[in-house]
């Protein structure tokens, strides 16, 4: 029987959550396979888009991938937004907001949201966020259990605070902790028991 392999990584900014580039328009894109030698059949569980960073789980086991992507498992993001986020905006995020998915509107499920104070400290990003002269920024924690296309970015924009930086810090009870961008840890299995009630 094949022994599956599992990895926890900090996906850096600017990388696609894939190993093979099968689209000609993505010629010069960076892929996860450039970070290390991975076993054949490796896949990322869920995705972080090119401009998002943080915790990403990789596995050769499709069943594990399904478990982690289920709505029972919480995914927590630390989000730097444009402006000084208000209590009202945080409450709206909690309750669910309308976002556009393809050609229709969708209301996000209720979730956990809070302003982060003190603000989290991450490695400086390769591409600068923006200049301080453009006004204040603030950080929120957003914990969701669904994963629609660019959902977190659409949610913060919907309440008037566009996302500037997006870092996934937790999946279930697996934490990003002190991992640095591009770092990889191989584990025997994923400890993802922390799930929410659905």
Image (tube, rainbow, N blue to C red):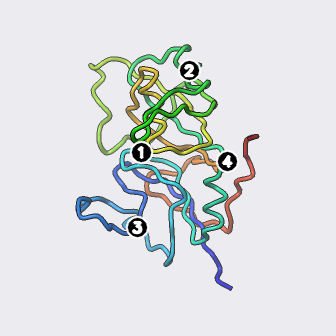
Distance from disc 4 to disc 1, alpha carbons, whole Å, reads 20 Å
Q: Identify the residue shown where x is 41% and y is 51%.
A: 12
Sequence-earlier tag: 2 or 1: 1
Q: Is residue 84 left or right of residue 63?
A: left
Contact check, label 4 and label 1, Cβ < 8 Å: no
Q: Residues within 10 Å of mark 3 (few under 14, many from 20)?
A: some
Residue at left offset 44%, top offset 25%: 158
Say if residue 163 shows up in the picture.
yes
Tell me: residue 17, above or below residue 91: below
CA separation in Å, label 4 and label 3: 24 Å
The spot of residue 6 in percent (x, y) is: 60, 67
Q: Which residue is pictured at 56% across the width and 20% down the height?
A: 92
Tell me the tag on residue 100.
none
Label 3: element kind: loop
Residue tagged by mark 3? Answer: 19
Element type at marker 1? loop
User: Marks 3/2: CA distance?
Assistant: 37 Å
Visible residue check, residue 117: no
Q: Which mark is residue 73?
A: 4
Residue 47, how many percent across, how many down?
Answer: 48, 53
Can you identify the residue that label 2 sits on?
92
Chain-order first, disc 4 or disc 2: 4
Marks 4, 1: nearer the viewer: 4
* Mark 1–mark 3 distance (CA, rounded to whole Å): 17 Å
Q: Earlier in the sequence, mark 1 or mark 3?
A: 3
């Amino acid at each position: 029987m094949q022994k599956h392999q599992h990895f926890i990584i900090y996906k850096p900014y600017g990388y696609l959550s894939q190993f093979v580039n099968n689209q000609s328009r993505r010629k010069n894109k960076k892929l996860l396979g450039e970070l290390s030698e991975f076993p054949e059949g490796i896949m990322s569980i869920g995705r972080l888009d090119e401009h998002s960073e943080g915790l990403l789980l990789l596995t050769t086991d499709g069943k594990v991938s399904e478990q982690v992507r289920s709505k029972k498992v919480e995914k927590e993001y630390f989000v730097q937004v444009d402006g000084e986020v208000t209590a009202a905006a945080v409450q709206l995020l909690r309750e669910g907001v309308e976002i556009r998915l393809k050609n229709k509107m969708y209301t996000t499920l209720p979730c956990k949201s809070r302003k982060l104070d003190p603000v989290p400290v991450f490695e400086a990003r390769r591409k600068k966020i923006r200049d301080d002269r453009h006004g204040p920024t603030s950080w929120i924690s957003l914990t969701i259990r669904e994963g629609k296309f660019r959902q977190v970015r659409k949610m913060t924009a919907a309440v008037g605070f566009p996302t500037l930086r997006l870092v996934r810090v937790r999946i279930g009870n697996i934490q990003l902790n002190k991992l640095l961008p591009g770092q990889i840890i191989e584990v025997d299995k994923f400890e993802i028991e922390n799930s929410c009630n659905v």
